[in-house]
Amino acid sequence: MAVYIKAFVLPPLLFVSSYARNKHIDLGFDNADDSSLGVNVDVSPEAILKFIDGKNKQKKSKKKSMKHELIFSNPFPIPRKQENPEEEAPLDPPVIGVYNPKPDFETENRGAWIIHSQNAGVAAMHIQLMPNNKAIWFDTINLRPSAIQNNPPFCKLVSDRPGEIDCWSHGVQYDVESGQATTLKIMTDTWCSEVGLSSIGDLVSTGGYQKGIYSIRLMILCDNCDFQENVNGLAAMRWYATQHMLENGSFILVGGRGAHNYKIIPPGKLQFQAQ
């Protein structure tokens, strides 16, 4: 390949070299050592061939480097530094539990998580903030002790474990301002039940597990109230069902495990005619 390149390239280069040496005055150069590329440029055939060989080596080296980068690319490239990076305003350390209504700078973050209570006693399978600024939450009752006992004391027999009693609370009313938790009495199992806030501000819970599968629970809007329950308020079993409020304030209860139908539940009632 090198022989062919020299055979085709060398004669024209010899002509160009000879022409350039003889035409330097006509082209406006001061002497034979000057050229349009700069001063003291060697335009001999040997120098030109050496220059071409150097360019070919540079191309081969560049292709080899690009191939290496494609195969073994850097997974953590260092970003280029901007010439004039914008200086970010220093951030003040957050103060836990303190709300600043007028921040020093605007961000897309509209809130922050803080620990409001180290232990409210009950896990929140369902949680609902009520219109009186109290949060109602409750868990299933079949997982044995919670972290808080009923107050005032109250115990009940465990239906599926003969001889065992349960004195633990499985629901609380939580004051979001003071952090105080008040225990709630729940008689029927609420595991995988449904819950929603009614149009008049009451909390309506339906279905559940075992003896709670036909239940309706009602928590009216007051500070120290317990759930009112109707163990047989539903005609069909409701476990993993869907509960949604309608435009007129009633709830529609759809489906569930083994229930291929729906039921309309009016707000604020434990007993009603089927619709």
Image (cartoon, rainbow, N blue to C red):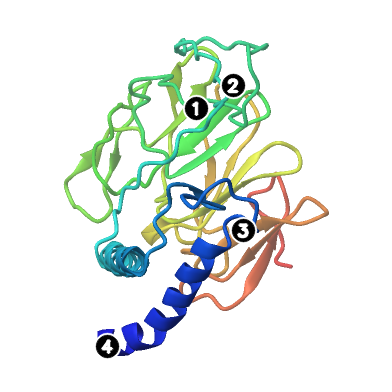
Ranked by sequence position, the earlier of labels 3 and 2 is: 2
The amino acid pointed to by label 3 is Gln
> Can you tell which of label 4 and label 2 is closer to the viewer?
4
Q: CA distance from mark 4 to mark 3?
A: 87 Å
**How far is disc 1 from disc 4 in space, using C-alphas?**
94 Å
C-alpha span from label 2 to label 1: 8 Å
Label 3 vs 1, first from the N-terminus: 1
Q: Please name the amino acid that badge 1 sits on.
A: Gln
Identify which amino acid the numbered label 2 is placed on: Asp
- Given residues 102 and 22, the one toward you in this image is 22
Q: Quadrant of residue 150?
A: top left
| Residue contact at pointers 3 and 1, CB within 8 angstroms | no
Identify the residue at image location x=56%, y=71%. 255
Circle 3 is placed at which residue position?
Answer: 243
Mark 3 or mark 2, which is nearer to you? 3
Q: Nearer the viewer, residue 194 or 219?
A: 194
Q: Report crowding for label 2: few under 14, some 14 to 19, many 20 or more residues within 10 A (C-alpha).
A: few
Look at mark 2 in the image and give the residue it sits on. 223
Vertical arrangement, residue 207 with respect to residue 142, above or below: below
Q: Residues within 10 Å of mark 1 (few under 14, many from 20)?
A: many
Task: Decide if residue 172 is on the left or right side of residue 99.
Answer: left
Residue 14 vs 218, above or below: the answer is below
Circle 4: element type = helix
Q: CA distance from mark 3 to mark 2?
A: 25 Å
Q: Position of residue 21 (x, y in %)?
A: 49, 62
Above or below: residue 82 compared with residue 162: above
Q: CA gap, disc 3 to disc 1?
A: 22 Å
Comparing marks 2 and 1, which lies closer to the viewer? 1
The secondary element bearing badge 3 is classed as strand
